[in-house]
Amino acid sequence: MTETTPPVVRSGLTTALATAAAASAGAGLVHAAAAGTHNGDPTLSWLFAAAAAAQLAWAALAVLWPHRLLIAAGVALNAGALLAWVLSRTVGLVGPLAVVEAVGTQDLLAAVLAGLAVAAGLVALLRQSPVARANVAAVGLATVLVLAIAMPAMAAEHTHGASHEHGHGEATSSHEHRGDDRETEAHEHDADGHAEGTEASVEGPIISVDDPRLSEKQQERATDLIDETRAALTAFPDEASVVAAGYVSIGDGRRPGAFEHFVNHDHLTDDKSLDASAIESIVTQRQADGTKKVMSAMYILSSGSAMEDVPEIAGELTTWHDHQNLCWDPSGQRLAGSLVNGECRPGGVLRATAPMLHVWLEDTPCGPFSGIEGHGGSCEHGH
């Protein structure tokens, strides 16, 4: 009797391949969530969206069409995502992504899922049998494990490390907020000065336009600047209107409640100063639902200016400040770190800022011009 060669049977879905598909899908979901949290940065947002689409698409195809070539493509895809993550956290990538990022919860878990997809995919390639089929219980357990990793990762805030929450965010202890202690040296109050007898009766920082320690001219200048600025901010009801007007995020304010600064580089380099029609920066605050609420305008003097150059408006009320320890990426437009023990960490190039002044859209407990950190350390910001 003549023996016949059995026909080649199309490979089935193995336990290893099912695990790889689930892990790739989990990583894709995390990257999709990251794309949403980076909507202020088009480059990163599109990269995360592309990675999410590729990982999710491969997961679906691997289940429906489990061929070796497709499995190898999935291994390469997830290995590439994992390698990009490792490089971005060690030496940086290229172009605007050449900054070494800090490890965050969301990106770490996405990397873990991609690594799991690579490992399981390799196992599928090495052990794949033409008659192999997945173990339902094992696949179910793998899926639960992947979801247990992916769900908290999707909910986690995609951070860039403490350096991106610079002096206007939570990490204020590492920054020199110098507006209050140098302002008196930089200003000469108007000739009409303070009203006699008021200094002894009023104590604490000046946080109100009506403070009797301000001269009439100071009160008038402060009131005019507040009214003009708040009128101009009505053109910016939300983040979309800010971005549409040419403002670009510097990359801070990633966590709920944190402030994010959007800068218009055309206004930053023009010759205008304290002009409500050409505000250099607009500050938003991330809400619990992920939206960003416009909170203040921030006027910034021209590059090279120092605290000695700030114009007199209303003395101690108008708390100009600068930052001497911020580090920036090669574009000079996004934060990359802060100065720690003489080094930029996690990366970037040290560049001091020009003096800047907030004008809040609504009155705050620390005054209409206070920095986010408060007013001279004696008033805690209420936002």
Image: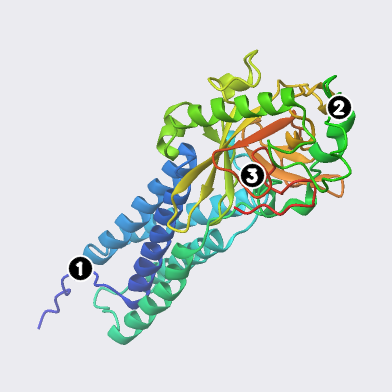
Q: Are marks 3 and 2 in contact (CB under 8 Å)?
A: no
Q: Is residue 258 above or below residue 13?
A: above
Q: Percent position (x, y) of residue 327?
A: 73, 39
Amino acid type at mark 2: Ala
The residue located at (47%, 62%) in the rendering is: 114
In the drawing, what numbered circle is on residue 153? none
Amino acid type at mark 3: Gly
What residue did someone put label 1 on?
Answer: 10
The residue located at (52%, 59%) in the rendering is: 157
Q: How is the image coloured?
A: rainbow
What residue did someone put label 3 on?
Answer: 92
The residue located at (52%, 61%) in the rendering is: 106
Is 346 left or right of 252, judged from the image as shown?
right
Q: Is residue 9 above or below residue 52?
A: below
User: Nearer the viewer's eye, disc 3 or disc 2?
Assistant: 2
- Quadrant for the N terminus, please: bottom left
Q: Is residue 310 above or below residue 336?
A: above
In the drawing, what numbered circle is on residue 186? 2
Residue lying at the far bottom of the rendered structure:
137
Q: CA distance from mark 2 to mark 1?
A: 80 Å
Amino acid type at mark 1: Arg
- Classify mark 3: residues with Cα within 10 Å, few (<14), some (14-19) or many (20+): some
Labels 3 and 2: the sequence-earlier one: 3
